[in-house]
Image: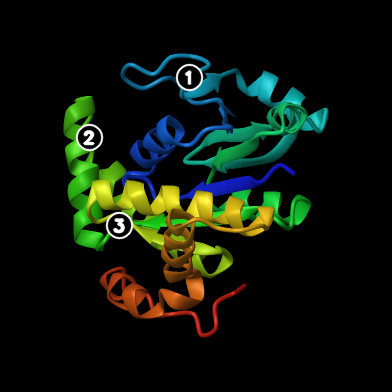
Amino acid sequence: MTVVYIISAPSGSGKSTLVNELRKTVSNLEFSVSYTTRPPRGSEQNGQEYFFISREEFQRLVSEDALLEHADVFGNCYGTGRRFLDSARERGHDLLLDIDVQGEQQVKEKIPDAVSIFILPPTRQELERRLRRRSQAEGKISEEVIQRRLVTAAQEIENYGNYDYILVNDQLERSIDELKAIVLAVRVSRSGGPRSAEEERWLVTAERHRQANMRQTLQPILESFSLSAIPGGRRS
């Protein structure tokens, strides 16, 4: 049975790096390349990071119900094609979706047993530092854009309670290992049967990152964004 994994994070949290590393190390995990109406950035190539299409073509996909989810982010449209889920199911593979909080809610409505993982920066200050570093690398330093993304990040983080697992991307190598453990632990828990010592370690790591078990870790992060914890979360 195909497992659908949803990974979301505020812009600048390091999600793309984690997803790329996960795809290198976990077999039988297909990646859904999203459609977007925004122009390519830097070295991005059509069909790799995104499918870059016109707004008219995007609206056609929406009208044909060809998208699992879609959203407008910073004035650009993003969406996930249903064909990727169909392809993964035909191959008996799992599917990884890299989508925002709006998309997560839409997919969960259609696929209730999808597994959602929210990636957080360690603090607001660290996120701002990463956004500035990325802006410098792209040669497009804009204080207005950075501040807008920080405001949006706080709004997105308020939705952490919708997610099954929380991962704080503080140390990259450790975060890669933890994300891999969560994905593989879900496979193990759904497959049944005897478990190896390594599989048991994955399960322990995944359990530690369940939303309900991350409250103490989350509190200082939320406070750095001037947010408070959501009592009980929105879904456990």
Q: Earlier in the sequence, mark 2 or mark 1?
A: 1
- Residue at the spot x=24%, y=56% of the render? 170
- Quick one: SS at disc 2? helix
Circle 2 sits on which residue? 135
- Quick one: SS at disc 3? loop
- Badges 1 and 3: C-beta atoms under 8 Å apart? no
- Badges 2 and 1: C-beta atoms under 8 Å apart? no
Percent position (x, y) of residue 81? 69, 30
Circle 1 sits on which residue? 48
- The answer to which quarter of the image holds residue 82 is top right
Circle 3 sits on which residue? 121
- Residue at the spot x=61%, y=58% of the render? 194
Decide if residue 148 is in sight here.
no
Decide if residue 58 is in sight here.
yes
Q: Which mark is residue 13?
A: none
Name the residue type under label 2: Ser
Q: Is residue 189 above or below residue 85?
A: below
- The front one of 121 and 182 is 182
Percent position (x, y) of residue 184? 52, 49
Name the residue type under label 3: Pro
Percent position (x, y) of residue 118? 46, 57
Q: Nearer the viewer, mark 2 or mark 1?
A: 1
